[in-house]
Image (tube, rainbow, N blue to C red):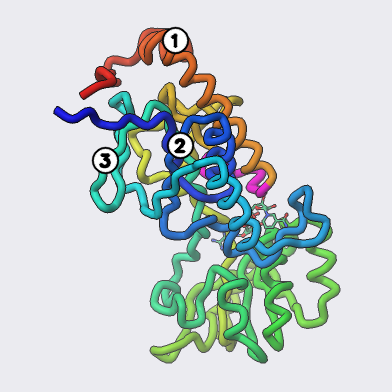
Amino acid sequence: MAEKKIENVVIIGSGPAGFTAGIYTSRANFDPVLFTGHEIGGQISLTYEVENYPGFPEPISGTELVERFQKQAERFGTRLVYELVTEVDFRRWPFVIVSETGQEYRAKAVIVATGATPRKLQVPGEAEYTGRGVSYCATCDGFFFTGKRVVVVGGGDSAMEEGLFLTRFAKEVFIIHRRDELRASKILQKRAFSNEKIQFIWNTVVEEILGDGTKVTGVRLRNVKTGERQDFPTDGVFIFIGHDPNSDLFRGQLAMDERGYVIVDRYQRASVPGVFAAGEIADHRYRQVSTSVGQGAAAAMEAERFLAEVEDKGYKEAARELLGEPLPSYIIVEPLEE
Ligand code: NAP
């Protein structure tokens, strides 16, 4: 039987964490494979400008930063596979990773960096009018609202940043927030408050997105203090109410918290020895390019350390040392050659 190739490291995800893991592991000669998914760069590629990533005193566009990450990872030999991963089996070692074209990969270590996805309001009309007035990306869709009225839902940094960006195009921007106090950082609050195109609608939630069958025409609002409802005309609805981790693929295989974030220790190690997680899949607290990059680097360095241990002692012993106890019986360790 032909010998099946066993990869040292497979990285799942092409955001700042994934590409950084690629840069580190390829530079260390581990010849990693990186699955990009369908949207290279993840959320950062939808960001208009990044102005708090060190080394860039002038703002850099999200897409350009991603291109630079990719170039740097490829320069050291990271092999990019432009596919989604549809299945993993971390109960077998070498781990099994199956891509959307059905191709099976085996790997001694996996770095999970699948990020998070913008949360939905889950109100009537939202799904129907997505792409027809409802958007989760001002950078992508702002231009279509030139001279129009838009609403932004949310009170965090994303809502402020994207709301400010929308003022480049829209005639009026209304930020609808469910409380009377913003969660956003002071600097962004200040900018939003002083922008004359932005107005705030406080203590209010969107109950429904209204449309004429082809496009958005308004939102049904409810004041949570008074209970009063009103239909508010708008051409666009931009929703920035947080994120959910892209962790469905790993359910039942990696330990997660109640929100579905993969649990890691301080060395980015997930619950299965040899699996690491970095970036927003494992971090709902910081969610910065710089923190994701740091976590990607740490995960890569820990993966390198783990591979050296495996080389030295074999998987079972390396895993036992990590877990401090015998390897759970549900993990099947196979011989390296098939
Ligand atoms: P976030 O900080 O979690 O804020 C989400 C906002 O949406 C909150 O104001 C929340 O209201 C509101 N919300 C949540 N669920 C809602 C619902 N069902 N209906 C109505 N409103 C709802 O999310 P984010 O703004 O996307 O930011 C995520 C992280 O990225 C943060 O750590 C942020 O600092 C960071 N970030 C940083 C920058 C930057 O540094 N330039 C830019 C963007 C994001 P409550 O306040 O009432 O909970």
| Helix, strand or loop for disc 1 | helix
Q: Is residue 259 above or below residue 333?
A: below
Give the quarter the ligand 1 occupies: bottom right
Spatial CA span between label 2 and label 3: 15 Å
Spatial CA span between label 3 and label 1: 26 Å
Could you classify mark 3 by the number of other residues whose Cα lies within 10 Å: few (under 14), some (14-19), or many (20 or more)? some
| Helix, strand or loop for disc 2 | loop
- Residue hosting label 2: 32
Spatial CA span between label 2 and label 1: 20 Å
Which one is in front, 42 or 285?
42
The percent coordinates of residue 9 (x first, y second) are 44, 32
| Helix, strand or loop for disc 3 | strand
Q: Is residue 332 visible?
A: no
> Disc count in the image?
3
Could you classify mark 2 by the number of other residues whose Cα lies within 10 Å: few (under 14), some (14-19), or many (20 or more)? many
- Residue hosting label 3: 104
Could you classify mark 1 by the number of other residues whose Cα lies within 10 Å: few (under 14), some (14-19), or many (20 or more)? few
Q: Is residue 132 above or below residue 123?
A: below
Q: Are marks 3 and 1 in contact (CB under 8 Å)?
A: no
Tell me which segment is drawn in magenta: 279-289
Name the residue at 22% across, 28% down.
3
- Residue hosting label 1: 312
Q: Is residue 287 visible?
A: yes
Q: Is residue 235 above or below residue 123?
A: below
The image quadrant that residue 235 belongs to is bottom right
The image quadrant that residue 297 belongs to is top right
Circle nearer the N terminus (2, 1): 2
The percent coordinates of residue 23 (x first, y second) are 58, 40
Circle nearer the N terminus (3, 1): 3
Q: Is residue 17 magenta?
A: no
Nearer to us of marks 2 and 3 is: 2
Which residue type carries mark 2? Pro
